[in-house]
Image (cartoon, rainbow, N blue to C red):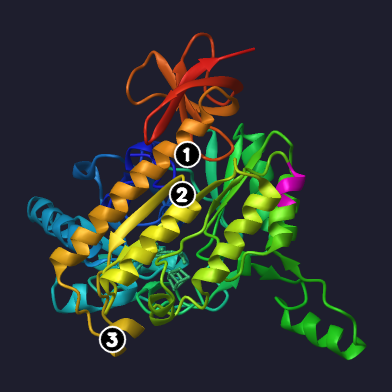
Amino acid sequence: MDNIIADIDIVNKVDDEVCGVKVSANENTGKERKMYIESYGCQMNFSDSEIVTSVMKKSGFDTTSDYNEADVIFLNTCSIREKAEQTVRNRLNHFNAVKKKRPDMTIGVLGCMAERLKEQLLEEEKIVDLVVGPDAYRDLPNLIQKADDGQKAVNTFLSREETYADISPVRLNSNGVTAFISIMRGCDNMCSFCVVPFTRGRERSRDPHSIIKEAQELYDQGYKEVTLLGQNVDSYKWSEEQNNKARLEKFEKKGEELVIINFASLLEMVAKVNPNLRVRFSTSHPKDITDEVLYTMKKYDNICKYIHLPAQSGNNRILELMNRTYTREWYINRVDAIREILGRECGISSDMITGFCSETEEEHQETLSLMNYVKYDFSYMFFYSERPGTLAAKKLTDDIPLEIKKKRLAEVIELQQQNALERNKLDVGKVHQVLIEGTSKRSGEFLQGRNTANKVIIFPKEQYSRGQYVNVLVEDCTTATLTGKVVV
Ligand code: SAH
Ligand code: SF4
Ligand code: F3S
């Protein structure tokens, strides 16, 4: 399955369907042992699996897409909703059944669930041999050795510095055209419903030189689009001095001003790598997205005009309970700024949660009215799932009955589909520049790619191929896709 941001089948769909699964590809270079990795959750987790693969390759492992022939099975896991964890548990049970026949096999749990449950899966439930949190992947070779020696193999240390800046990810399931670059890790926001600050730790930004180097290398290898990833890209912040304590002291003594690279300047640096390399980013936080970022997007044709700006709710009381730190009015002001600076064509998407603690019917109606104001091109939509340890779990009561949560979710989805169709109809009759990503899932006779606003466009193959830019006249649309033909 493709990445979650890019998969057309899940756009405007529900709940954990967005938690697509990705498995490692086969790569046989004659190494002694084989690793199979299955990844769940967000794009950042998929990106981490590419770091894990890089570490493992250096330590004598090839990858395989068939777990039956693997010496090590890794599940890179997600804790965002209860269902996501349940899916992983089912997989772990399945792999344990496989292990009964192959007792030499090592099963490891990585990522957010490893971080949240720590030793529990190893010591109490005894369904894994290895537990490794998101900041401990450099320790994998040592942990594998420990597991081989029958010792306790757990590392869930969360770092304030680790960004894996120097590790070149091994691209998994790649289409050779689009790739993801992690620009920061962790999250310092404390949205009351969210487990991420607990599973991923404090926010830290990656050295921009290593980001530019990675973008350049990808371009040199033939990639045509990079997506910069972070839980809150707008709070990206880096300075040579700040990130190096010794140099900071020297600077402070001299009383010089620090040169700080913020997200807008990073975006500009990546855009300058090559005008033929498209740049996307995700996720923007409504409280932090600046006009400076919007003007930088406007300045460069190769920065895609698409912003994922999760609102979560359209009601001020709920937004406050969620600790999102913005109001409906603030959010609307940001959407107006996007429309004013980047125009109607800029794609905007959202994440929405229905049935958060104490949400009334009127408050839910305000989410619907916000959706009608913005007219999102697409959305990821969920009903609230209480997560142990979060602020909401500690302080609020999860009091909306499941049927009501689901009923409200169904209303949100229905409205989203109407709005997406309305937005897509505006694209019909227009010519769009499309970067071809590959063959359409529907038919080998068609190709698919995206326009700047991240909309999937399908058109007859003719003589065109993956990695090319083409101009497509859009002739028709559904809620999820646009269809048309190449014009020259
Ligand atoms: N950093 C991103 C979101 C990361 S999690 C942001 O701030 O927007 C992805 C989405 O999962 C969230 O936007 C939210 O809509 C949803 N989500 C997070 N915790 C949830 C929970 N406990 N129940 C339901 N949905 C949740
Ligand atoms: Fe979670 Fe909020 Fe951080 Fe997003 S910004 S990862 S929703 S705490
Ligand atoms: Fe899930 Fe962790 Fe991402 S909880 S959504 S994999 S940061």
Q: How far apart are marks 1 and 3 (CA)?
A: 37 Å
Question: To which residue does mark 1 refer?
Answer: 423
Q: Distance between the residues labelled 1 and 2?
A: 8 Å
In magenta, the rendered stretch is 296-300
| 180 w.r.t. 395: above or below | above
The amino acid on which the numbered mark 2 sits, given as a three-letter code, is Tyr
Residue 396, numbered label: 3
Check the picture and name the quadrant holding the N terminus. Answer: top left
Is mark 1 in CB contact (under 8 Å) with mark 3?
no
| 337 w.r.t. 469: above or below | below
Q: Is mark 1 on a helix, strand or loop?
A: helix
**Image coordinates for residue 73, horizontal then vertical, percent:** 26, 54
**Image coordinates for residue 440, horizontal then vertical, percent:** 39, 24
Residue 486, numbered label: none
The image quadrant of residue 464 is top right
Residue 376, numbered label: 2
- Tell me which image quadrant ligand 1 sits in: bottom left
Q: How far apart are marks 2 and 3 (CA)?
A: 29 Å
The amino acid on which the numbered mark 3 sits, given as a three-letter code, is Leu
